[in-house]
Image (tube, rainbow, N blue to C red):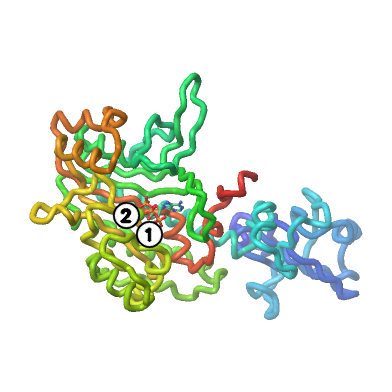
Amino acid sequence: MRIPIHAVHPDTGEAEIIGWVHEVRDLGGLTFLLIRDRTGIIQVTIPKKKASESVLAAVKAVSRESVVRVSGPVKPIDKAPGGRELVPDSFEIISLSGSPMPLDVVEKVPADLDTRLDARFLDARRPRVSAVFQIRSTVTRSVYEFFFSRGFINITTPKVVAAATEGGTELFPIAYFEREAFLNQSPQLYKQMMMAAGFEKVFEIGPIFRAEEHNTTKHLNEATSIDMEVSFADHLEVMNILEDLVITTYKTVADQCGDQLSALEIPDLPVPEPGFPRLPYPEAIEIAKRTTGEDIKYGDDIGTVSEKAIGEEMGVHYFITDWPTEIKPYYAQPYEDDPSVCKAFDLMHPRMELSSGAQRVHRHDQLVHQIRAKGLSSDSFEFYLNPFRYGMPPHAGWGLGAERLVMTMLGLSNIREAVLFPRDRHRLVP
Ligand code: ATP
Ligand code: MG
């Protein structure tokens, strides 16, 4: 625990701390308490013979995980956490915790993920869990600063929408007065419309909703997407920005989150090297074919097994480029010299996909053609298509999953570890 400076009296070295009772150990003549807050743990030592009646009464009454206010001199001592202890002159119980608790905060009793998520407020008192969300907060700040420092405009787009971004069945329908509406699966169409508005560089960090019934360790039904779009840029330019953003974010966490990384037993966060390899799709599936022995053909999507196999071979962050137009969304721009291949890319961590992006189609008639080629009706896209009739600049962009970024950075085994209150197939509470 970092003792707040203002709480330490300059002459006496007396300090006042407020926190949760992490552990109590009674050794007869001495009682040791560990008091915890989000910055760490400090030992409070009560010599029974010397302590006041009121301190002894409070220590006797207190239970683990109660909130207490303790004051007294702080002394250096070798064996205690942080190398010091506080010997209390006063000990006040601010909020007594009930027991037994739904979850053991000191992790002596292991708990499965479901139990932990049910009691997330207790789970998040655990230094390791708290560290993940403190790091996620730093990641978010770093991403905002990255975009602002490069002249991006932050936008907010609707999450309640009338039409799907890409068609398909991955939408949550909701009742919107007399009509049916949906929770948006991506800000894609809206950020493109802001290119027609002349905003040039936009970004948004917001929720996306996917009704896929998958129950995997890397999918959520409500996730956070870091989205950006840039005018007069091609896919190569926005890939460079994406690579810079990932490296900058790792650097910021490595520089600023030392205590939290230690809590996670990551003494040195390895920052990815610049120059992420760019692997054309045909080469990627060749690797998948060779290493998995499966019959993978040109035009197949890269599934979880292939993704893992290619990732193992690559060993670092990399891009998959030059995708078949057929398996990427209608808004991806085909190459002029070979329209069967498009200017789309995925950013991959060796474990999984982190981001998808592309240079976009910016010509109205071509876009209508590509929407129809996917078997979709252009009528329901009128609000989106209209801006393409009145001066749409060429543009490119991407969407990056915030939880996957944090999950892969910290080596978390399940994406739910990177969300405070995950929404999945079975979880809607808390
Ligand atoms: P995947 O193939 O891994 O399911 P996707 O290709 O369907 O992902 P995109 O539509 O390309 O996902 O979304 C861009 C990024 O948003 C993804 O690379 C991922 O990081 C994140 N993302 C998308 N869907 C989810 C989800 N259900 N849960 C968590 N993150 C997601
Ligand atoms: Mg994708």
Q: Residue furthest left?
A: 337
At mark 2, the secondary structure is: strand
* Residue at image point 38% right, 76% down: 292
In the image, farthest residue toward the bottom? 78
Dividing the picture into quadrants, the one containing residue 231 is top left
In the rendered structure, are the residues bearing label 1 and label 2 in contact, judged by CB atoms less than 8 Å apart? no
Q: Nearer the viewer, residue 157 or 323?
A: 323
Please tell me whether residue 360 is drawn above or below residue 270 in the rendered image. Answer: above
Identify the residue under disc 2.
356
Residue at 20% x, 36% y: name it.
368
Q: Is residue 133 visible?
A: no
Is the C-beta of the residue carrying label 1 under 8 Å from the nearest atom of ligand 1?
yes
Give the quadrant of the C terminus. top right
Identify the amino acid type marked 1.
Answer: Leu
Q: Residues within 10 Å of mark 2 (few under 14, many from 20)?
A: many
Q: Point out residue 290 in the picture as x, y percentages from the top left corner.
A: 32, 78
Q: Quadrant of residue 198?
A: top left
The CB of the residue at mark 2 lies under 8 Å from ligand 2: yes
Q: Which mark is residue 354?
A: 1
Q: Is residue 410 above or below residue 123?
A: below
Amino acid on which the number 2 mark rests in the picture: Ser
On the picture, is 92 further left or further right than 281?
right
Q: Is residue 117 visible?
A: yes
Kindly indicate the quadrant of the structure image that contains residue 308: bottom left
Seen from this angle, which residue lies furthest top?
178
Question: Tag 1: Cα neighbours inside 10 Å, few (<14), some, or many (≥20)?
Answer: many
